[in-house]
Image (cartoon, grey):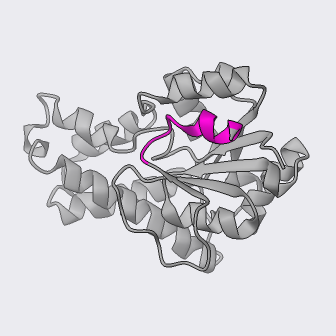
Amino acid sequence: MPITTCIFDAYGTLFDVAAAARQAAGEPEFPHLQDNWAELANHWRLKQLQYTWLRAITNAHTDFWEVTQDGLDWAMESAGLAGDRALRQRLLDLYWELQPYPEVPAMLETLKHAGMNIAILSNGSPAMLDGAVQSAGLGDVLDDVLSVESVGIFKPDARVYDLVGKRFGCESKEVLFVSSNGWDAAGASGYGFVTAWVNRADEPVDRMPWKPSHILPDLTAIPHLVES
């Protein structure tokens, strides 16, 4: 069955989640971040994801912005930066302006010209996603931005993946779901999507019951994957 619909995770897939800490580290106000920004960014992202999973399995949902702040607070305390309120605010402000990875605009334009349905499916809140999409200038190439807030639970719950078929009226095998998160790609594979795991860090495949259909180093080959 041919692919008709390309669905992308947002954070870490289209948008560089390390960009906030990296940019802040280059600003003169935060010289103390220059040596440990990468560790801070990694801890922030890991806790952000862990909190979504914990909230999903304990039925304690909140929006992704609160989870993002909670993850940052943990990461800053771990790095000995808990008292730096100016840095905390700057990092949170930058998170609303995350830049896309370099190949993203051209890749999405190619899919658009090929007649694909194109959308984001993300844990992000609608306001966060709107800020990221507008900041990156991607609004014209996306048919929709789908947020888990409409179902009140985080990925990889099947109710989140259900949003794609409801929006586009397509079967699961018509969907190419693309994520930089191995667990997300695995969950989407189990759901029935064709999946591509964007493994930028060359990490091992997660030990899950399901595997991604494709593993790519970046998003450049997505249009070719759809054609083939």
Would you say 128 lies left or right of 120 here?
Answer: left
Q: Residue at x 51, y 50 (%)?
A: 65
Asked which quadrant contains residue 189, the reply is: bottom right
Whether 3 is among the magenta residues is no
Residue 120 in the figure: left or right of residue 54: right
Residue 161 x, y percent position in the rendering: 74, 58
* Residue 8 place in picture, x, y as percent: 62, 44
Above-or-below relation of 101 to 85: above
Q: Total number of numbered labels? A: 0
**Residue under the image location 67 percent in, 28 percent down:** 111
Q: Is residue 92 visible?
A: yes
In the image, residue 105 lies at what x, y percent? 53, 24
Q: Residue at x 67, y 62 (%)?
A: 188
Residue 226 sits inside the magenta stretch: yes
Q: Where is residue 54 shown, x and y percent of the image? A: 53, 75
The residue sitting at the right extreme is 169
**Which quadrant is the C terminus positioned in?**
top right
Magenta part of the chain? 217-227
Is residue 127 in view?
A: no
Q: Quadrant of residue 191?
A: bottom right
- Left or right of residue 118: residue 216: left
Which residue occupies 19% across, 47% down? 37
Q: Nearer the viewer, residue 228 or 42?
A: 228
